[in-house]
Amino acid sequence: MRVTSGEHPDIAHVRLSDTDMGVFRDAAEFIYPAAREWPEAVFLDEMEKEASGLAAFEFAGLAGMLEEFGTHGSWRVVVVHAPPPVTAELIPTPDRYLEPVENGLLKSDIHRGLILGLAEWYGYGYDSQQPGNIHNNVIAIAKESRQGISANAHLQLGFHTEDASYNLGEGYNVSPDWLTLHFLRNPDRVPSLVSLPDLGELSADARDALEEPFYINRTNPGQGGDANNADRPVSVIYYEAEDGSPWVRLNTEFLEEDIKDGDYSAGQRAALAELKALIDGAAVELDNRPGDIVLVDNRRTWHGRKEYGPNQKPRYDGYDRWQRRLVAADSAERIQAHEIDPRIVSPAKMFGAMAVGTAATS
Ligand SMILES: O=C(O)CCC(=O)C(=O)O
Ligand SMILES: [Fe+2]
């Protein structure tokens, strides 16, 4: 295994040796016949066990690297170049969201499952997004015209931290620490975007404003949209990191509207505009190929997608761009507090608990 630095000093690429590639392939072959029968939650439990064996020996180097990444104090994005899916084994790219019974386990899911296990991250899904599925499909959908949803190929997907609107402070946070995007197909090489700004470049005024709890993030349409916005303002920059470094929660998709005329003060709007400019200026394109597993530190990184260009339009022929998304947390307990099924979290349940908590203290 070699670690090379990439498009930005905070982006690392993991280049696996032929032996490592073989371990991934063999593990997938061996586990798949049984794993395809397991519910997703059971599958992830099993991957944790499987990975702990590999971490001791075959994948000790990778486990060590992921442990360092997992501190939230080193790289902000790691791309593991895992074996690409075997073309003959991969089902057509879906052109709509799948029901859980249709959304079977793929052999490639085992590669990412092992990485989650090595990193000791807790993978989960939502009852508000592709409900019942823990592995979500990121695909283009022909009739999708809403802004801010990954399935809309006509528009750029604006920079966001994943599920920013569900990050409402201690006890009320079901947003992921880690976002994993696993590329199965990307024939026209539509890039994902990440933004890695240096918050030290913000003016003191902007930073002071962004550390105050005034902002309500908009929930993306794929997560239920405005109906799932919280009734609780938060600070955009917050401090929960062990090393004291700033963390961020912000969906910039609808930020222009808030900057123009939201319910916010002139100083707050100026601070949001300054941060937006900083984020846009720190954009990096990721040229993802099948097999790439992009691991994003969702506390310190924004991500999005460029619009599909004129020669990149989806064809809906089964071979379009397709990635699997799995979100993950450092602490299983933080998520389990708001679960309705194993590894399925319910933001509505969290909002309900929040309302009760507020009533009790007011
Ligand atoms: O399509 C992409 O590259 C990014 C999608 C995205 O933001 C997500 O799935 O969370
Ligand atoms: Fe996203």
Image: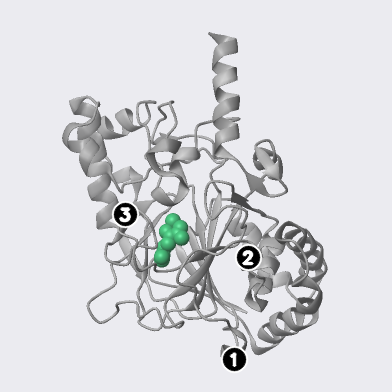
Quadrant of the rendering where the N terminus is positioned: bottom right
Residue under label 1, please give it: 88
Name the foreground residue: 99 vs 1.
Answer: 99
Residue under label 2, please give it: 65
Q: In this picture, is 313 found above or below 348?
A: below
Residue under label 3, please give it: 146
Q: CA distance from mark 2 to mark 1?
A: 32 Å
Q: CA distance from mark 2 to mark 3?
A: 39 Å
Residue count near mark 2 (Cα–Cα under 10 Å), binned few <14, some 14–19, many ≥20: some
Name the foreground residue: 360 vs 128.
Answer: 128
Type of residue at label 1?
Ala
Give the percent coordinates (x, y) of residue 82: 59, 79
> Are the residues flagged by discs 2 and 1 in contact, CB closer than 8 Å?
no
Type of residue at label 2?
Met
Q: Is 118 displayed left or right of 160 in the figure?
A: right
Model colouring: one colour
